[in-house]
Amino acid sequence: MARYLSDRTLGELPATVIRPAYDRAALAPGIVHLGIGAFHRAHQAVYTDTVLASGDLRWGIIGASLRSADTRDALAPQDGLYTVAARDGAGQLRVIGSSGGLLVAPENPEALLAAMARPEVKLVSLTVTEKGYCHAPASGTLDETHPDISHDLAEPGLPRSAIGFIVESIARRRAAGHAPFTLLSCDNLPANGRTLKSVVTRFAELRDPDFGRYVADEIACPSTMVDRIVPATTDADRAAIAESLGMEDAWPVVTEPFSQWVIEDNFPAGRPEWEQAGATFVKDVGAYELMKLRLLNGSHSTLAYLGYLAGHETVAATIAAPGFAELIRDLMDEEVSPTLPHLPGLDLAAYRADLLARFRNPALRHRTWQIAMDGSQKLPQRLLNTIRDRQRAGAPFPRLALGVAAWMRYATGIDEKGASIDVRDPLAGTIKSRVQGITSASELTAAFLGLEQVFGTDLPAIPQFRAAVEAALTSLLRDGAGTTVQHLRTS
Ligand code: CS2
């Protein structure tokens, strides 16, 4: 029988593999994390692992999946241990031990609520992706018509959404006289702490206005900027890592060496000293967030849609194709950077150069299809808010508009060879019914711009915006993505 990674087999790993240097049995669960996907496991769980290794054992993580049992099924037999492989050529392997309990919310909502209500839990952190906030992406406010929100308001003791779990557990702590936890959003949303606070407060208010006031007054929601590129693990990754470990790991994560975490220092219930692992605590993360969302994620989404349409499977393959590196460089230099506030001590030119190198990392197989998911939730903070700023400044934005048009072209669900695209997006159904049978760029633009939850009411009313998107879409439909990108270079 295959040998697996576990507390029992840790001692048998090759000496080169870094492993938890603390007594895992002595960990107290100070953190409940919602959404234990690859990103959390390669980012916050690693920073926390370093804090635990320093001897502060108060911050063990109870990890919950809000949907599938996959992660728990893979990691529970391994006592929650897994490997992080940081790759850019050579790889370094590190086994992470910070995740202890693993819960699957739909199997047993009560177990998760009980964990979140434990007095030693000081922090509830989240990586539930943009759509997990059940908000309208254009406005950032709670979508009160969201089916999970209606459900969780009707059945507060059996929540489905992260928001429902958070609010019910706050109510239980309050009733039990436990101090509130701090809520830490680690998703790529603008002002993620503020957005989380707004949806949670509104949800609590809908339950009871007095409770809404309590949440508004008592729950701290620091904002964060999180950054590490973490593609979905492949079977080839599993095989290569098993080979190096000399044993199986059912779900390792593969990532880049780069990692960044900037956090607003507002933790009334206390916090781990993540600065020991390189996190930066600041008064205001706003400028860092804008820089990262607009430069990294804006470029990523643009590369994902155009790259997928041009037939490229990964980001590294896309950026290596003719015209793409120039497109992203010019997008960042000419259109995005002028919208960013000045950050003292930060060399923006070096940051942009690093980004291009990170996108080129050939050791990461980051699929364009993966990043293309949930575009309706991502576009506002990645591209549309930047366009708003450019428009206000009277400045052009052809490359940003191309990114938006590429999303539209992709979201029609048919690729350049006429094959169907597996579009994963909460609005996929709505979009499909809106664009059915439409082939002209102008009608498609109009159909998409009618999505108020994405574009708001301001953008569609701006003639320059409409015209730029329609021009880009015309070229994508007529010439295809690869040629459109190459022409940009020569035009
Ligand atoms: C990516 C991000 O999938 C996506 O949408 O743009 O997950 C990106 O890799 C991270 O934000 C990097 O920090």
Image (cartoon, rainbow, N blue to C red):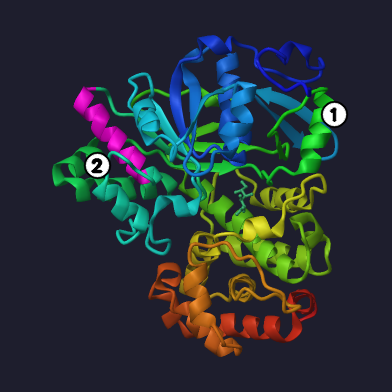
Q: Label 1 CB, ligand 1: below 8 Å?
A: no
Please, what is the three-letter code of the amino acid marked with disc 2?
A: Ala
**Which image quarter is the C terminus in?**
bottom right
Q: Judge the density around disc 2: few (<14), some (14-19), many (≥20) Cα neighbours within 10 Å.
A: some
Q: Judge the density around disc 1: few (<14), some (14-19), many (≥20) Cα neighbours within 10 Å.
A: few
Whether residue 124 appears in magenta in the rendering, the answer is no
- The numbered disc on residue 209 is none
Q: Which image quarter: residue 415?
A: bottom right
**In this picture, residue 396 sits left or right of residue 354:** left
Residue 46 in view here? no
Q: Earlier in the sequence, mark 2 or mark 1?
A: 2
Please, what is the three-letter code of the amino acid marked with disc 1?
A: Glu
**In this picture, residue 482 sits left or right of residue 277:** right
**In this picture, residue 180 sits left or right of residue 432:** left
Q: Which residue is mark 1?
A: 243
Q: Position of residue 327 (x, y in %)?
A: 73, 68
Q: Secondary structure at mark 2?
A: helix
Which of label 2 and label 1 is nearer to you?
1
Instruction: Out of 473 and 335, give the one closest to the viewer.
Output: 473
Q: Which residue is mark 2?
A: 216
At 55% from the left edge and 54% from the top edge, which residue is drawn? 293
Q: Position of residue 465 (x, y in %)?
A: 52, 80
Vertical arrangement, residue 407 with respect to residue 66, above or below: below
Residue range in magenta is 163-177
Q: Position of residue 130 (x, y in %)?
A: 48, 53
Q: Position of residue 86 (x, y in %)?
A: 74, 35
Residue 475 in view here? yes
Q: Secondary structure at mark 1?
A: helix
Vertical arrangement, residue 401 with respect to residue 426, above or below: below
* Principal secondary structure, stretch drawn in magenta: helix
At 72% from the left edge and 25% from the top edge, which residue is drawn? 94
